[in-house]
Amino acid sequence: MKTRRTLVAICLCVVIIAGFIPAAAASSYAHFTARNTYREQFTDVSPSSWFAPYVRRGYELGLIQGSADTTFSPNSNLTIAQAIALACRIFSIYSTGALPTLYQQSGAPWYEAYVSFALDNGIIETRFGNPNAFATRREVAVIFQHALPPGSFAPIREVADGAIPDVALAADYASAVYMLYRAGVLSGSDRYGTFNPGTNIRRSEIAAIIVRIAEPARRSAESIGGQTDSGAALSAAEIAKLASPAVFHIQAYAFTGEPSISGSAFFISADGLAMTSFDLVTNASQLIAATSDGSHPAVIVDVDPANNLALLQVTGTGFHYLAVANTSAIRQGEPVFSMANTPELGSVISQGMVSAVTDAGVRVSIQADDPGSVLLNNHGEALGIFTDSATVALIDRARPLNPNADISIADTFAFPIYSEPFQAIDFGRFTGAMPYSASSNLIRGAFQYNIMDFQSAELFSAAMANYQKAMIRRGFRLEEIDELTMIFTHADEVVTVEVGDSVNIHIERLPHFYSDFPALVDFGWFANLSVFNYTIPENDGRVILEYIWPGTNAELAQVIADYHTLLIETGFTFTRQRVGVLFETETLSVAVIVDEELVTIDILPLD
């Protein structure tokens, strides 16, 4: 009974104490009140800049802080972790009137407490792979859609389904984007409401978003969308004036340090994200963007080889950029423009029309003036990139390009091989070095390159390291390596790379043999031909195989000569006969007969 009385007393105590705990504050926008005093302390936030009022108010509300005591870094990109932290602060202040209560584990990164809070309160559903990565606009929309309880983002304007040009309704983030657009929190980057879902978001832009979330009176009710129906078409001169500041020249450099291919690219964000052709930047050791304000280094941040597209990050901020158009309404016969930027002529614009529309892209009646030229609609918006002189890859139909991807030059190899039938990557075309000796046939190849073609030891080391990576990605296996030699093997060949006074590449094909005659090299494999006719004329094991040669007589003569050499190297002796050439071992007799384009391999087992 004593235990029971004690338990009852404890329960009564708990009830009495609970009676003195105040009820939780009701959720309300009124909780967003000034907590800090802003004294114009951020020297990089000009009072005249468009984002200054949002930075001020966000700081006063305790939602945002500076990057340092006297700087805000308005042009820096927001990380996923920072976006989650902001959403947690908004959620907690709205719900309780106070900043979130966080439980930080010893040794855990600073953002882990915010991630746990966000998961516990339904702000995010799952963890992000790398919280320190720069957040894309679509990721920000997904995070902030739950920064307030359900029903808090009441629609204040009509945004029809499909009205946002570059947000497909089937996208997993579409519902979040449309909700925030309709609530007046988001409005896009142009009069059509273009969202640019895959681009990063700057701290200046996030300041405006969080203040609009916290104070509904600041949200926009201005109508948006309807790209194909709103806005007057522009003249060629107007499009040139609008687009030319965003289109620039890009120069790729080989691993030797020498300039290689060059072409055009164009910005899709003010903070340096740009699009160009994959073919233009693949196998480059360095990229330099020549914009109107000078030269800027550029790096590849993602690639889509299937659509021949590459996403670049150019060093710098404040660039003019193009909106990406919704291509779902492209119609045959509508006017379009191509724009390039060349060192000789500067911006070059041409006008034409859409001649065909396919699932893969469009064909147009104008010619691209430069690799990487942009195709524009008559509103000056980017539709796609020229993949050849008249075919365009549509940007918004490509796979999503992720600006946070960790893409190196080694991830963009297009594998320039020597020639059929070799599988090895052409060292010269890959690095930019010129061969000073080369010989090859269908059996083996030997190529030499001058190390002095490389301008520095660092460039040569980078070339060798990236050639090794490319060969492995090509399907070769690295069998041996030391400071001077690399040996790669493949199902069909062995490649030896030797470094001395020169770089020597030796390729040896590994022969395939007939399954019924394992000592005899398969002519079909060797010449890359299929059997035209297969005959077993007698019961003595004799087999006759016939092949049709599709090339020239001179090419066939070289193939036959190389095959003869290979048979001798694999243990056959030969005797010329009246028709064709006879090769023999102790167990096999093989006649090779050529009659114009018909090649006959007559095989007879010997007793």
Image (tube, helix red, strand yellow):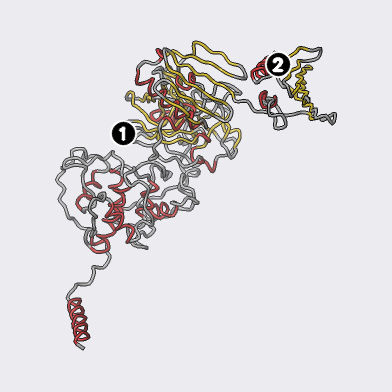
Task: Determine whether, in the image, residue 596 is placed left or right of residue 474.
Answer: right
Residue 292 in picture, x, y percent from top left: 35, 25
Residue 151 in picture, x, y percent from top left: 37, 63
Front residue (pair 170, 217): 170
Report if the CB atoms under discs 2 and 1 are less than 8 Å apart.
Answer: no
Q: Quadrant of the C terminus?
A: top right
- Residue 377 in view: no
Crowd rating for badge 1 (residues with CA inside 10 Å; few <14, some 14–19, many 20+): few
Crowd rating for badge 2 (residues with CA inside 10 Å; few <14, some 14–19, many 20+): some
Residue 91 sits in quarter: bottom left
Residue furthest out toward the top: 436
Residue furthest out toward the right: 538
Front residue (pair 78, 491): 491
- Report the amino acid beneath label 2: Thr
Q: What residue is pinned by disc 2?
A: 573
Q: What residue is pinned by disc 1?
A: 317
- Report the amino acid beneath label 1: Thr
